[in-house]
Every structure is written in structure tokens, then in C-alpha cells.
């Protein structure tokens, strides 16, 4: 076989693989081999079963496995790192029913909380911590041969002035039977600078609010299984923080990773029942959100403005998504909502420009806020859950690619700007149950050809803008009746008269 023939066979094989990837939802355009790997990784997860990723404390993906519903995942060999002791995984590996991220949990070999600090001046720099001692004696090793001991109870102040610049590892450990924790505003510098580069939290059992607030240089924080509670804003504006594996059985306050711009991985344990408000708000580098089994609610703003997120995985246990929870995630292109979901808050997916294709909302939804899919330009089809009695304001506002919509007979109101600027929408069937047609609900739907009304009395229309800028050729169909009473009622009703020239009778 000639070289030319072999190259031709390889090219054909690549083309076949490319077509197969894109047929399953991929977007492969570059035929270089690294692009194939990235495209396969980005395929819709349900095509292959439930994706389970084993993730190390630094965010490295150790193993990826696809598992059928109800099956168990198989972990890799226990990872090992110098100075750390592997404690296990933060999430169960059994009965996998949805995508799952599993994080490796470690403690320190020293058994102490360790803080790597970097001194940038030769003399006169004082490091200060504020540990809270509940019992026992706390020993502080400053990493240059100097140690201090802390006794008594309550919030303490421990300080040390280094004689030279350089890197030091500070260790804090309580005596046997003692108990301490990292309280609110645990660390700062005497001159207002923040100095921690890495932290490994062992021995201490909780982190208070603002514990590491504005530690701009912290790139990694390892949390051992000792940690059972993390307070609000604990890592707010730790702008260099890259990855965190949350330990099992931990409880979380709100805004924990707010403004952590470099945070690419957060691995949640399956002990959680909620993702609190603004947990990862403005985490621009986050690339994937996997909500663990057991979580029933995602709080407002939880992942808003996480522009780099490409995938969101929801568990079967999820019941509610808070307002603005996934707002402005520009890279998100696919969402699979779980059966059992009952509510989605206002603007939950607003500004997810790449979100497209068909969206299937579970029949169990009973409540939706306004502008949920505002500017989700690529959505082509979406259903209205049958338990809803209304279509929310701005429901598909500026969903330019929306082609069709089915309105169930349970709906009585179509909200303001519900389908504003849905340019590809060509026809709408409005059931007799609809009694209210709100301002701008089909405004600027420039491809509309037919709107069929089943109700024999015109729904209330609060503004002539409800159908502004529909094409001149668009036909508004109303039920046929003797002597055209229904047609006359529509043509003369308040605000409907503006569209009298579009109206025709039709037998249903």
C-alpha cells in the first residue's frame, strides 16, 4: 500500500469520526488530533451514560469513567503526594444516577494545619494569625526553627516577624484532646498585605466567615476531612485560587468562592442538600459544574457570571433552581433538567448565549420566574410544563432561533415579552384557556405566519405592543361563528382593533 493511499485512508477515517462526533452534539471544526479529544470530551454526557470524574486536590482529573444508571464507579489507585495522607473520596461511588465529580481528600502527614507563606522583604515583616482555641494548647511552628505555644480559650493573636525574605511553612497543631478552629478574619498582614501562597487545613474543624478573605496570592487550599463547616465569604476574592475539593460532611455558608476569578474546579460532596447563594459567583475560570446527588436546591446567583462553564450536571434529587443561578454563562450550550424539578427562579439562565437546541422542561415544574431563558439565542424548541397556568414574563426573550412552541391548555396568561424577538417562530396555537395576552408577548416575531386563537371571546390585551411588528402577511385566526360574532368581537376589542386587518375566521 502506497503512502498516498494510507494518508487517504487516515483522512477518511478522521472525516468519519468528525461526522460521528458532530452527530452526537459535538462542534468539531478543526481536524487536528487535540481538537478531536476536546470534542469527544465535550459531547453530550447522556450519550455515554453518567460521567464520573475523579479529581485530585489541585484540580487534576485523575480518571474519567462513564457509568450506567444504578451502577457503581470504579476508583483509580489511591493517589499519593509527599507530605499528604490520602483519606478517601468525598462522594459515594455507588448507585450512580447522574454525572458525578469525586474528589480526593487528604490530611497532612504532620497532622497540623500548614500555611506556606512568602516573605517579600528582608526584615521587619510581621505575620499575624487569629486562631480560636476552645481547649488544650496550640503550638505554632513558624518554619524557621521558632515555635510559640498558645493557651487559654477564645480568639487569640499570634504574630511573628521574620528576619529574612523567603518561603516558610507555618504549622499549627493542638495538643491531644484539644480543639481549635479558624475563625472569622483569621489572617492578615501587619501592613495590610496578604501573604499566604498555599494552605492545608487539618486539625482545625471549621473555617469562619472571611477566613481567608482577599488573600490574592493563595493558589491552593487543601481541606482535610477534619473540616466540617465553612463560613460565608471564607475565600472571597482569593483571586489566584485554582481548585478546591470540599471534604465529606461539610456545611457551607453563602458566597464562599465569590470573585475567585481563577477557580477552575470545585468538587462538592454528596452530603450537601443545597448549594448556597452566590457560592461561585464570578468564578470566571470554572469550566464545569457538577451538582452532587442529594442536593435539592441551587441558591440564587450560585454560579452566575461563570463565563467559562461548558457543562452543568444536575442530580435526580434537584427540586429548585434559584434566581440568576446560572446567569451569563456564555459557554454553556446544553442543559438536561432532571425529572422532579419543581421551580426555576427569575433569569436563572439569562444571557447563556450558547445554550441551544431543544430544551425539555420536566412536567413536574409548577413555578417559573421571568426571563429564565432571556437571550438564549440558540434554543430551537422548548415545552411548557402542563402544571403551569402562565407563561412567565420574558420566558424566551430574544431566543432568536426558536422555531416552535406548544402552549398547553392549562395556561391562562402569556406574560409580558414572553416571546419577544423570536425571529424564527412561524406559527402559534393559543388554546381557549388563555384569557390574558400581555404587552410585547409576541413583539417583533418577524417570521410569524399564523396565530390561531381557540377562545371565542378575545383575551384581555393590555397593550397594542403584544403583536407589534409582526409581518403584514401574518394571519390571526379566530373561531368561526354565525354572523361572524367572534370575529367582530376580536376586531373591536380594546387593543385588538390595531390588528383587525390580520384577522380571519377558521373552523376548529
Image: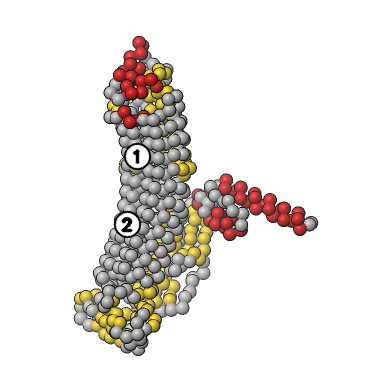
Q: Residue furthest right?
A: 1
Mark 1 or 2, which is nearer the eye?
A: 1
Q: Secondary structure at mark 1?
A: loop
Which residue lies at the image location 28% right of the left edge and 81% below the top edge?
Answer: 126
Mark identifier at residue 394: 1
Q: Is residue 212 visible?
A: yes
Colour style of the rendered protein structure: secondary structure
- Tell me how far mark 1 sits from mark 2, CA to CA: 23 Å
Using the image as rendered, state which of residue 403 and residue 30 is in the foreground. 30
Residue 482, horizontal then vertical, whole percent: 36, 11
**Residue 278: which disc?**
2
- The answer to which of marks 1 and 2 sits earlier in the sequence is 2
Residue 468: percent from left, percent from top:
36, 30
Q: Residues within 10 Å of mark 1 (few under 14, many from 20)?
A: many
Residue at 46% over, 39% down: 401
* Quarter of the picture holding the C terminus: top left
The vertical placement of 276 against 477, above or below, is below
Q: Is residue 442 visible?
A: no
Q: Which residue sits at x=40%, y=18%?
A: 504
Which sits in the foreground, 84 or 357? Answer: 357
Q: Which residue is at 44% across, 73% downward? A: 86
Amino acid at each position: 500500500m502506497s503512502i498516498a493511499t494510507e494518508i487517504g485512508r487516515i483522512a477518511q477515517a478522521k472525516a468519519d469520526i468528525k461526522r460521528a462526533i458532530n452527530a452526537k452534539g459535538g462542534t468539531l471544526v478543526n481536524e487536528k488530533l487535540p481538537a478531536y479529544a476536546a470534542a469527544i470530551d465535550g459531547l453530550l454526557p447522556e450519550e455515554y451514560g453518567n460521567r464520573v470524574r475523579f479529581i485530585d486536590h489541585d484540580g487534576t482529573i485523575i480518571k474519567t469513567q462513564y457509568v450506567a444508571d444504578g451502577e457503581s464507579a470504579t476508583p483509580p489507585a489511591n493517589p499519593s503526594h509527599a507530605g499528604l495522607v490520602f483519606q478517601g473520596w468525598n462522594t459515594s461511588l455507588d448507585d450512580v444516577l447522574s454525572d458525578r465529580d469525586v474528589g480526593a481528600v487528604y490530611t497532612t502527614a504532620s497532622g497540623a494545619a500548614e500555611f506556606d507563606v512568602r516573605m517579600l522583604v528582608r526584615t521587619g515583616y510581621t505575620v499575624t494569625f487569629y486562631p480560636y482555641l476552645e481547649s488544650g494548647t496550640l503550638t505554632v511552628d513558624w518554619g524557621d526553627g521558632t515555635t510559640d505555644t498558645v493557651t487559654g480559650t477564645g480568639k487569640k493573636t499570634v504574630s511573628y516577624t521574620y528576619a529574612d525574605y523567603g518561603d516558610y511553612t507555618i504549622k499549627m497543631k493542638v495538643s491531644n484532646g484539644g480543639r481549635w478552629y479558624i475563625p472569622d478574619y483569621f489572617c492578615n498582614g501587619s501592613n495590610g498585605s496578604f501573604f499566604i501562597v498555599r494552605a492545608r487545613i487539618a486539625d482545625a474543624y471549621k473555617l469562619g466567615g472571611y477566613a481567608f478573605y482577599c488573600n490574592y496570592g493563595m493558589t491552593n487550599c487543601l481541606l482535610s476531612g477534619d473540616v466540617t463547616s465553612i463560613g460565608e465569604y471564607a475565600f472571597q476574592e482569593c483571586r489566584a485560587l485554582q481548585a478546591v475539593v470540599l471534604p465529606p460532611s461539610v456545611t457551607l455558608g453563602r458566597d464562599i468562592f465569590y470573585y475567585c476569578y481563577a477557580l477552575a474546579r470545585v468538587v462538592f460532596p454528596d452530603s450537601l442538600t443545597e448549594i448556597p447563594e452566590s457560592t461561585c459567583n464570578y468564578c470566571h475560570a470554572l469550566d464545569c459544574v457538577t451538582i452532587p446527588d442529594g442536593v435539592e436546591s441551587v441558591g440564587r446567583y450560585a454560579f452566575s457570571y461563570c463565563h467559562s462553564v461548558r457543562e452543568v450536571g444536575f442530580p435526580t434529587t434537584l427540586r429548585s433552581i434559584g434566581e440568576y443561578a446560572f446567569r451569563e454563562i456564555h459557554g454553556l450550550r446544553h442543559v438536561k433538567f432532571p425529572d422532579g424539578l419543581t421551580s426555576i427562579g427569575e433569569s436563572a439562565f439569562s444571557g447563556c448565549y450558547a445554550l441551544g437546541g431543544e430544551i425539555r422542561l420536566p412536567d413536574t415544574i409548577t413555578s417559573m420566574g421571568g426571563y429564565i431563558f432571556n437571550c438564549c439565542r440558540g434554543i430551537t424548541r422548548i415545552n411548557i410544563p402542563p402544571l403551569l397556568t402562565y407563561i412567565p414574563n420574558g420566558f424566551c426573550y430574544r431566543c432568536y432561533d426558536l422555531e416552535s412552541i406548544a402552549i398547553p391548555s392549562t395556561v391562562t396568561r402569556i406574560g409580558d415579552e414572553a416571546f419577544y424577538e423570536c425571529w424564527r417562530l412561524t406559527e402559534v396555537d393559543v388554546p381557549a384557556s388563555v384569557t390574558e395576552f400581555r404587552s410585547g408577548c409576541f413583539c417583533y416575531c418577524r417570521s410569524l405566519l399564523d396565530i390561531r386563537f381557540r377562545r371565542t371571546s378575545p383575551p384581555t390585551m393590555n397593550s397594542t405592543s403584544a403583536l407589534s411588528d409582526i409581518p403584514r402577511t401574518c394571519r390571526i385566526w379566530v373561531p368561526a361563528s354565525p354572523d361572524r360574532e367572534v370575529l367582530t368581537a376580536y376586531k373591536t376589542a380594546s387593543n385588538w382593533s390595531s390588528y383587525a386587518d390580520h384577522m380571519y375566521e377558521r373552523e376548529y
